[in-house]
Amino acid sequence: MAYKSADEILKPDIRFDNICVPEGQGWRFMTITDHHQMIGEVGLQGAAPTEVCGAYDRARNTMLYAFFDYDLFVVGEVQAYGAFELALKHRLNGHGLQQKGTLRNLVDRARKTGIFPKLVAGAPILDDQVEVMVLMRNALAHGNSEVHPPGMALQALKLCAWGIDTIFPGDVVQEGDCS
């Protein structure tokens, strides 16, 4: 998508022109209200720290603005995976500060401490939601030219919400949680 001119920035992206939602017995074109509701329904339910909630909401807001620039879905996904990684840092390190290591290291540590279940030997890697997050995050974080449709972006957002809520369920309260 080319850089938008000032008079076009608040016009819906043309790729939304043919996206429909059910209404009664028929269908109608999606509105910004529909888009907002769809993203708003994918919130955090656990007790994540305020910084993690803020990072996650940054992802949701980015995806909200994808109504005006479809390419922002991928940016929102990257931010959602970043919120997931930040949640791991908070839980495992007691803070979100940068430490040496990778998302892979954090996930492996989380598996060892029982936050996530251990991998099942011989099971397909795509059967494990955490491994799917690592693969998808790495694919986006290391540069590509993909553009994801709203449904795919929403699934990534839901997956990250699940991951963050698993890291910080309601019974693991941190100072400043967003519940």
Image: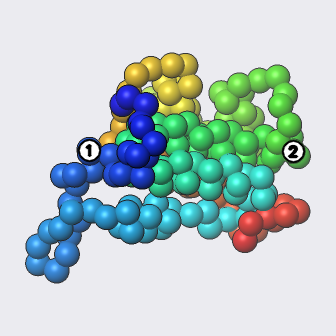
Q: Quadrant of the N terminus?
A: top left
Q: In the displayed structure, does residue 10 sit left or right of residue 161? A: left
Q: Residue at x 40, y 22 (%)?
A: 145
Residue 27 at x, y percent in the picture = 15, 68
The residue type indicated by label 1 comes to Arg
Residue at mark 2 to residue at mark 1: CA–CA distance: 40 Å
Marks 2 and 1 in Cβ contact (< 8 Å): no
Check residue 15 in the rendering and tell me which mark sits there, or answer none.
Answer: 1
**For residue 179, above or below residue 17:** below
Q: Residue at x 73, y 42 (%)?
A: 86
* Along the line of sight, the residue nearer the viewer: 6 or 112: 6
Asked which secondary structure carries label 2, the reply is loop
Rate crowding at label 2 as few (under 14), some (14 to 19) or many (20 or more) other CA atoms within 10 Å: some
Judged from this view, the residue extending furthest toward the top is 143
**For residue 3, above or below residue 20:** above
Check residue 113 in the rendering and tell me which mark sits there, or answer none.
Answer: none
Can residue 92 be spotted in the picture? no
Q: Quadrant of the C terminus?
A: bottom right
Residue 63 at x, y percent in the picture = 48, 49
Residue 166 at x, y percent in the picture = 64, 55
Q: In the displayed structure, does residue 88 sit left or right of residue 63? A: right
**For residue 149, above or below residue 21:** above
Q: Earlier in the sequence, mark 2 or mark 1?
A: 1
Residue 6 at x, y percent in the picture = 45, 42
Check residue 95 in the rendering and tell me which mark sits there, or answer none.
Answer: 2
| Image quarter of residue 100 | top right
Judged from this view, the residue extending furthest toward the left is 25
Rate crowding at label 1 as few (under 14), some (14 to 19) or many (20 or more) other CA atoms within 10 Å: few
